Structure formats: structure tokens, C-alpha cells
């Protein structure tokens, strides 16, 4: 879930802090909890039975971001996604990213936080490689995915390792990309344009190609344009690719979830994509929402889905009286729904800033199978400063690096009656 200022040319470092504008505009105002339940032995309602902060994962990103050995690596970012590579490494993908050095507080009393320079470099996307043992090692040359045209940019979302072509032995990484274009308000974070798929070589992680798989520019109303790739799930030979619309601040703050499916090995083949039209799958059909009623039910523009014992579980941010701190969940027996919920999942722990007017918020919950196991679901969420004034928000994430980094929790899911 992201909102960045691109209404006029300006310093690139001012964009990420406006991410929370989208978070405010696109998250769902939901009521918690919900009593709608159904299911059978093959698919049963699932809920979060317990959760705890994953301090080790959060601390590893803090360690890497605070390392001053290099001046061209990642120090913070949002839009957190990951994929495990065949050799055991994990590739982490980020949208708007700070590069450069950070500085230890010279005065722990007056300046208790590690901080960035005001002129810290900012790029639209980045990738960080984690070792098999779980240590973050290096930042690939950034931005990894170049801008497609002036005043346009690419944000990486979900990624998969798949055969270069169906049945092939060679594996590649496919990265789904959202392309946006600078515009005036209310589209301060850019007008959605298209979904693309990049192919990365293995093991070098070199970008080989970028192809467009879903062009939305013919859809006149930007609020009805669908960008795919916020999350993917594999099932029975298909990759289900979830996406959504963007609600605007002037509209009801609820986005709609959509889903497409692609045979394994063909994510980069636009002709292989099928869309759900409300009744069946097809090529060249009009995609219909699978979740969202413009009011109580819906998603933020970035959400995540995991399949647990035959049940699909979706996590998204809750808003309303909960503020941007509560993650809610839905469950379904099918990627096309019906989706049941929302139910409260957990309260996202936020870093303490020491500012009496603290306005930090959580957004973009994402599941990371590479970190899970033993019945645990590891989920990240991004953190930013929520402030209507871009200059103030920028100043806060600069003076305190922890306000623009992912944090992690471990969840355990359980069946409910």
C-alpha cells in the first residue's frame, strides 16, 4: 500500500513519506469481528490463534540498515516482498527506498535515534539479498527496474521462481511490477497504468526482460483500474495472482480485490493470463471484484493471501476506530470467494519514537513463506509517519530510520467452528 507525491517534479526523497496518504485512502473501514462462518472437512474457517513479534527478523533489517560500511546500500524502504531462491538465498524486494549512510545519535538524550542526512538518495525500487543462514548481505544496483518513461516508475510486488518455460529445467525469477505515472491530486501517488512482469536470471539476478501483461490505460476511471501482483498463491498447477483497485481520499476508503490465474511457468506470457469475470475464468474478459462492497468489506490496495490446509486466508489493514494499527483477516475455500470476515487478526506493534505527537502507522501486510515453517506464518508490515504535511513527514523518517523499515510478526492459524 503506497502513496507518493508525484504531482510535480521535485526532490525524489520526498516521495516515500506520502505513502500513508494511500494507506489512509485505501484501507477498509471495517467492523470487527464477524460471525459469517461456513466450511467442511476440506476447507474450514481459519483465524489467527496466536501471534508474537518476530524480533529477530526485525532486528536483522535494523542491523543491515544501520551498517555504515557502504554508502550505496539499503537503509530503509517499503512495499516489502520476498522470494526464496533455489540455492537457499532470499531475494527481498522494496518499492521507494532510501540509500546511503545513516548516523548514530551524537546525543542520546537530545537525538536518541539513528538518523539519515536530509539529502539521502531515494530510488523507486531496490532488491536486497539474504544468505541461506538469514543474514542480509548486499543491495543490488538500484534501482533494479528502471523507469519505463519520464514521469513513470515501477514498484515491484510479488515474485516467484518458476521454469523459464513450462516443463523446462532452467529456473528464473519472475517479478510482478506496478507501473504508475505522475499526476495531480487526488492521484498524488501516481495514476495506475499497468502490470508488468520482469524476468531475472539465476543465480546472477540480472534483469533480462520486462513485459506488460495487463494494460489498464484504456479504463477511463483510474479508480477502476486493477493492478495485479500484491500477492500470489500456487494451487493445482496454477499461480493465482491477486490485485486490487485504488480508492481515493475523496471516495469511500475501500478498495476491491481481484484475482487472475496463470499456468505455472507462464507468468511472463500475457496470453496465458485468465481473469475471473464473476462466473468463470477467461481471456479478454472484464475482471470482477471477488471482495469489496464499498463499505464494510474490502481490502487496502496492498494485501496478502496464504493457503493453509486447503483454506485461503487474506490479511489486510483495518482502519476506522482501530486506526492504522490493526490487521484484519478473511478466509475462503476458493481464490474467487466468497470471502468471509473481516475478523481481527492482531495489533501491529509500532516503534516508539519519543515524540508526544507520534503519528506512526502500519500498512502493507505481507506473508513471507521463506521465513515461516513449523506451523508459523511470518508476516511483515511497513511503518511510516502519518502526517498531512509532506515536509514534516519527510523530516520524521529522516531523523528516525526505524520509521521507514519493515517489522515482522509470527502468527499461528487455527480452524474455527
Image (cartoon, rainbow, N blue to C red):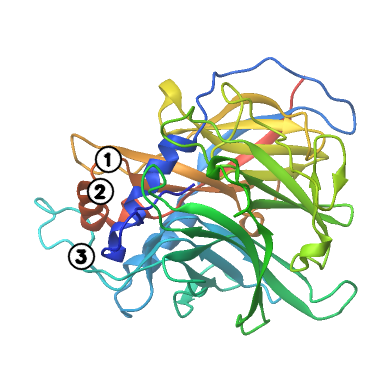
Relative depth, front residue between 307 and 52: 307
- Crowd around label 1: few <14 · some 14–19 · many ≥20 (10 Å): some
Place of residue 216 in the rendered image (x, y in percent of width and height, measured from the top left): 63, 53
Is 240 in front, or is 333? 240
Q: Residues within 10 Å of mark 3 (few under 14, many from 20)?
A: some
**CA separation in Å, label 3 and label 2:** 25 Å
Image check: 189 left or right of 8? right
Say which of marks 3 and 2 sits in front.
Answer: 2
**Label 2 with label 1: CB-CB less than 8 Å:** yes
At numbered mark 1, what does the secondary structure look like: helix, strand or loop? loop
Q: Label 2 vs label 1: CA separation?
A: 7 Å
Q: Nearer the viewer, residue 207 or 342?
A: 207
Task: Give how far across and how far down residue 370 sits, in percent.
Answer: 65, 60
Q: Secondary structure at mark 2?
A: helix
Q: Earlier in the sequence, mark 3 or mark 1?
A: 3
**Residue placed under numbered mark 3 in the picture:** 104
- CB contact under 8 Å: marks 3 and 2: no
Reading the image, the residue beneath label 1 is: 387
The image shows residue 107 at horizontal and vertical percentages of 10, 58
- At 23% across and 60% down in the image, what residue appears? 114
- Residue found at x 81% / y 21%: 38
For residue 405, side relative to residue 135 (left or right): left
The residue carrying mark 2 is 390
Q: CA distance from mark 3 to mark 1?
A: 25 Å
Task: Give the mark nearer the N terminus: 3 vs 2.
Answer: 3
Q: Is residue 33 left or right of residue 96?
A: right
Q: Quadrant of residue 244?
A: top right
Mark 3 against mark 1, which lies toward the viewer? 1
Q: Give x and y (percent) for residue 323.
A: 40, 28
Amino acid at each position: 500500500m503506497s502513496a507518493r507525491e508525484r504531482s510535480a517534479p521535485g526532490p525524489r526523497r520526498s516521495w516515500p513519506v506520502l505513502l500513508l496518504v494511500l494507506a489512509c485512502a485505501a484501507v477498509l473501514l471495517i467492523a470487527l469481528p464477524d460471525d459469517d462462518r461456513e466450511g467442511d472437512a476440506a476447507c474450514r474457517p481459519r483465524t489467527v490463534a496466536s501471534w508474537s513479534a518476530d524480533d529477530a527478523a526485525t532486528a536483522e533489517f535494523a542491523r543491515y540498515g544501520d551498517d555504515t560500511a557502504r554508502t550505496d546500500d539499503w537503509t530503509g524502504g517499503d512495499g516489502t516482498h520476498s522470494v526464496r531462491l533455489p540455492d537457499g538465498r532470499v531475494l527481498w524486494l522494496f518499492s521507494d527506498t532510501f540509500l546511503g549512510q545513516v548516523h548514530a545519535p551524537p546525543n542520546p538524550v537530545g537525538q536518541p535515534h539513528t538518523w539519515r542526512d536530509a539529502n539521502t538518495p531515494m530510488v523507486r525500487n531496490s532488491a536486497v539479498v539474504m544468505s541461506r543462514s538469514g543474514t542480509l548481505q548486499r543491495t543490488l544496483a538500484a534501482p533494479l527496474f528502471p523507469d519505463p518513461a519520464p514521469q513513470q516508475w515501477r514498484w515491484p510486488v510479488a515474485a516467484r521462481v518458476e521454469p523459464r518455460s513450462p516443463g523446462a529445467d532452467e529456473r528464473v525469477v519472475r517479478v510482478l511490477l506496478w507501473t504508475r505515472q505522475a499526476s495531480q491530486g487526488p492521484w498524488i501517488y501516481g495514476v495506475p497504468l499497468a502490470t508488468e512482469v520482469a524476468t531475472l536470471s539465476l543465480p546472477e539476478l540480472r534483469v533480462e526482460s520486462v513485459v506488460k501483461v495487463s494494460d489498464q490505460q484504456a479504463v477511463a476511471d483510474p479508480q477502476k483500474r486493477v493492478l495485479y501482483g500484491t500477492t500470489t498463491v500456487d494451487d493445482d498447477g496454477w499461480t493465482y495472482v491477486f490485485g486490487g483497485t485504488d480508492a481515493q481520499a475523496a471516495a469511500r476508503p475501500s478498495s476491491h480485490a481481484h484475482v487472475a490465474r496463470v499456468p505455472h511457468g507462464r507468468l511472463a506470457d500475457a496470453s496465458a493470463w485468465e481473469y475471473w469475470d464473476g462466473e468463470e475464468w477467461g481471456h479478454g474478459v472484464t475482471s470482477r471484484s471477488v471482495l469489496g462492497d464499498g463499505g464494510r468489506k474490502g481490502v487496502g490496495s496492498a494485501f496478502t493471501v496464504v493457503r493453509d490446509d486447503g483454506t485461503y486466508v487474506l490479511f489486510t489493514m483495518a482502519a476506522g476506530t482501530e486506526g492504522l494499527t490493526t490487521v484484519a483477516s478473511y478466509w475462503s475455500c476458493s481464490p474467487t470467494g466468497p470471502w468471509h470476515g473481516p475478523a481481527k487478526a492482531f495489533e501491529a506493534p509500532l516503534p516508539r519514537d519519543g515524540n508526544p505527537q507520534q503519528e506512526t502507522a502500519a500498512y502493507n501486510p505481507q506473508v513471507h513463506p521463506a521465513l515461516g515453517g513449523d506451523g508459523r506464518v511470518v508476516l511483515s508490515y511497513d511503518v511510516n509517519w502519518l502526517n498531512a504535511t509532506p515536509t514534516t513527514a519527510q523530516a520524521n523518517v529522516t531523523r528516525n530510520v526505524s520509521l521507514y523499515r519493515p517489522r515482522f510478526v509470527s502468527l499461528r492459524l487455527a480452524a474455527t467452528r
